[in-house]
Image (tube, rainbow, N blue to C red):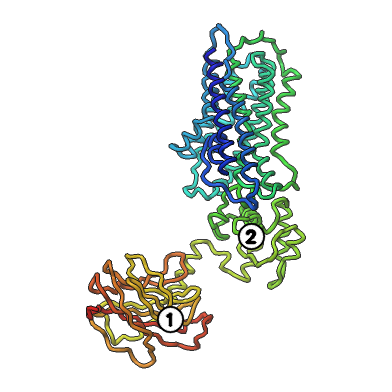
Amino acid sequence: MVWRRLRIFIVGIYLISVAAAAVVSLIDGSVKPLWLLAMWFPLVDMAPLPAREGVIAVMAAMLVMVSVAKSWMLWQVFSVPAGGDRPLGRRVVWLRRLLYLAVADALILSAALGTVLSEAVAGALHWLLWGVVQVLFVLVMVRASRGLRGAALALAGLNLVVGLPVMLEEIPADPNVMVFAETPWVEAAFVLLNLAAAGWQILILFAQRADGRWTPATVVVGWLALAQSVAHPIIPMMIARYVPGVTLDFIWLVGELLVFHTVWSARSAHELTAPPQPVVEVEPGGLSSRGRAAVALAVLAPLAVGVQAEEKARLTYGGGWEGRSPWIHGGRRFGDTKPQDREKAFLCHARDSTRGTPPMFPDTLPDQYVLAYGRRLCELPEGKDGMDILREAGSSREVWRADGEALVFLCPGTVAGRNPAELYSDAEVREAEERFVAEGNARCADPWPELRGRRQGTAAYYLFEGGGYSIYDVNDDPEDIAGEGGKVVTAARGSVHVSTVTENTMMCMTVKASNTAPPPPGKGWNHLGTVRVLSRSGSLGVPAMPEGGDTGAGRVLPDLALKGKGRYRVRVYARDLGDADRYNEDYVEEHLIVVFPDRSGG
């Protein structure tokens, strides 16, 4: 009676809350309360959809469906356990406890543990729990043949022996980097473990049917749970591929509808207390015909699901939501990619849809076709676009650009002939950048050695789009100053902005700090302007180019605030070193910056 009342109370309160949240969602246009009740975790932000009209109603309807499925799950979980006054064996007692623990894990524990434990540790605990459950499940069967029990125990042992090392495999610190690409054996091990788990459940369902303690309804739910485990990774992918405008929020909703495994675990635990049927001896020397059929199905069915046709579109390397690729999200280069992973890298690039443009090839195109089309693109002569090939492949791209960072993984020799840097590793890129900056610094020398500043320095300065640079208090927020009223040098508070003739190139820059105003430099220099600036923290300078940056000084230049906090005058000179072509790669402009204390008091 207590269990029945508890079940009615829990499910009733849940459904009433869902109904109220659904009404609120339709009134104020927000599904967050309904999402929390249906999904059991908060909706932080809904992904944008191409068309918003009707989206709230559709999502609310799906959330209600999820809630109904979960209310049925809760009704089953809190059902009155099948009773019996007979004593239960130790294995049965422990199996019931662990099955209920598995149910609690599915309902709430996994989410709670995820907040205090790492993903690897939480996954290992979950795998250990189910590994022990699988072993005990086999041991409590009273009508299973020795062959069936042996096969099921072997699969359970495989899950334990192989599964724990896989789950404890170190997960990268960067959550955007996919672990499978770092350790390919983990990917293969997961496939093996999923096949073993499916095979184990097939054997257990045959054993449950013959045992007599479990009702036919429980066995049916078990088969639905098995179908769920096969369909779960496939259904979201199919929805994402064939339903236009679908978002990750809707994909999560579909996954939450699959509650059969939790219900099967709960019903299996409830009915373990039922009296077993009399043991039927199996003829020695082999399996019964039913046992042989069970073992054959346990072996062949997972293989039929796991091993697919060569021409079928593979979903492993999808570009948008499926996983975090180290080549797309981690920026891994050709030089850091193992030879056996190059085709995988190309497929990631070819299916990438995260950069605001359609993928190079449609997601429905099989991997083999994508690789073949990619190699045809590699064979195109330089300067010829590949739009004909992309249109033939069904691409939705309207324009094609020579995407060397993708094709390099298929035809490195061809791409290297056009741009050798595409073959570099990250370390080689850094070395090349450091070498380029060092060469630029070496080309610049002090243009006014006669004036010895208290602090001084010379460096190449690398200009970005639009040119110009700033001198500011590096310990303060720089002011965003643009050239005003045609002035080349402008200032406000702690920041000075200097416009330049050139852009997207380098120029030479020398800075000097003196205690007094120096005389003007020699012939050939143009005085661009003198401005006042305030150093509020006692620092003033030109910023160096950060690692991986594209603008700034090629080396660290000295602090120009000789007297610490206070006002300074900044005087800027420039001279032309040749044809002032704004797009000339050789430096044609040189600047001289002199800073000294402002003693005017104004």
- For the C terminus, which image quadrant? bottom left
Residue 355 placement (x, y as % from top left): 59, 59
Q: Quadrant of residue 531?
A: bottom left
Task: Give the residue drawn at x 65%, y 51%.
Answer: 51
Front position in the image: 223 or 251: 251
Residue 445 placement (x, y as % from top left): 37, 82
**Dot 1, crowdedness within 10 Å: few (<14), some or many (≥20)?**
few
Q: Earlier in the sequence, mark 2 or mark 1?
A: 2
Residue 191 placement (x, y as % from top left): 63, 39
Q: Name the side, left or right, on which 464 lies relative to 350.
A: left
Front position in the image: 250 or 12: 12
**Dot 2, crowdedness within 10 Å: few (<14), some or many (≥20)?**
few
Q: Hey, which residue is sitting farthest front in the picture?
A: 27
Callouts 2 and 1 close, C-beta under 8 Å: no
Q: Secondary structure at mark 1?
A: loop
Residue 556 placement (x, y as % from top left): 36, 71
- As displayed, is residue 115 above or below residue 45? above
- As displayed, is residue 123 above or below residue 239? above
- Number of the label disc, if any, that sits on residue 357: 2
Residue labelled with disc 1: 485
- For the N terminus, which image quadrant? top right
Looking at the rendered structure, the kind of residue marked 2 is: Thr
Residue 317 visible? The answer is no
- As displayed, is residue 112 above or below residue 186? above
Task: Give the residue drawn at x 61%, y 39%.
Answer: 60
Q: CA distance from mark 2 to mark 1?
A: 40 Å
